[in-house]
């Protein structure tokens, strides 16, 4: 028995809230990709785990690409290297984080 093909919705069929969610999700996805490409372009090849061309292509894959690049594509920056997200803040003095001029 053939499967029924699900009818695709048009932009005009979406509610304003659904449209906002689609736009916000797309903006976040694009921002992640741009941030990853900029980081890759500025980072020396020695600090990239693998070829830069490979990572540039991987970054283009939806959400997975940029997140994978940030997690595994940069040498020595992952949390698996023993670093802590709070280590730089914990090791500094409060005066270094003051917002006053």
Image (spheres, rainbow, N blue to C red):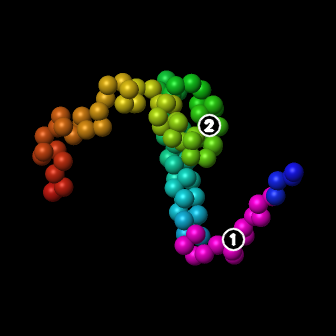
- Verify whether residue 12 appears in magenta: yes
Q: Is residue 88 left or right of residue 27?
A: left
Image height of 81 relative to 85, above or below: above
Query: Residue at label 1?
Result: 11
At horizontal 49% and vertical 30% (from top left) the residue drawn is 72
- Looking at the figure, which quarter contains the C terminus? bottom left
Q: Nearer the viewer, residue 93 or 65?
A: 65
Secondary structure category for the residue under label 2: helix
Q: Residues within 10 Å of mark 1 (few under 14, many from 20)?
A: few
Q: Nearer the viewer, residue 43 or 27?
A: 27
At horizontal 51% and vertical 28% (from top left) the residue drawn is 48
Query: Residue at label 2?
Result: 58
Picture coordinates of residue 16, whole percent (x, y): 57, 76
* Chain-order first, disc 2 or disc 1: 1
Secondary structure category for the residue under label 1: helix
Q: Nearer the viewer, mark 2 or mark 1?
A: 1
**Residue 44 seen in this snapshot:** no
Q: Is residue 79 left or right of residue 38?
A: left
Region of the chain picked out in magenta, as a range: 5-18
Picture coordinates of residue 36, whole percent (x, y): 52, 42
- Verify whether residue 60 appears in magenta: no
Q: Farthest residue to the front: give it.
A: 1
**Residue 20 seen in this snapshot:** yes
Q: Nearer the viewer, residue 57 or 12?
A: 12
Q: Label 2, label 1: how many angstroms apart (C-alpha)?
A: 29 Å
Tell how many labels. 2
Residue 96: which quarter of the image?
Answer: top left
CB within 8 Å, label 2 to label 1: no
Picture coordinates of residue 78, whole percent (x, y): 40, 30
């Amino acid at each position: 028995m053939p499967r029924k093909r699900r009818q695709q919705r048009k932009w005009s069929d979406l509610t304003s809230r659904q449209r906002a969610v689609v736009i916000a999700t797309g903006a976040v996805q694009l921002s992640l990709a741009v941030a990853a490409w900029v980081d890759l372009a500025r980072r020396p090849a020695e600090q990239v785990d693998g070829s830069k061309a490979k990572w540039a292509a991987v970054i283009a894959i939806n959400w997975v690409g940029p997140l994978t690049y940030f997690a595994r594509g940069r040498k020595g920056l992952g949390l698996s290297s023993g670093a802590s997200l709070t280590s730089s803040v914990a090791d500094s003095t409060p005066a270094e984080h003051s917002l006053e001029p």
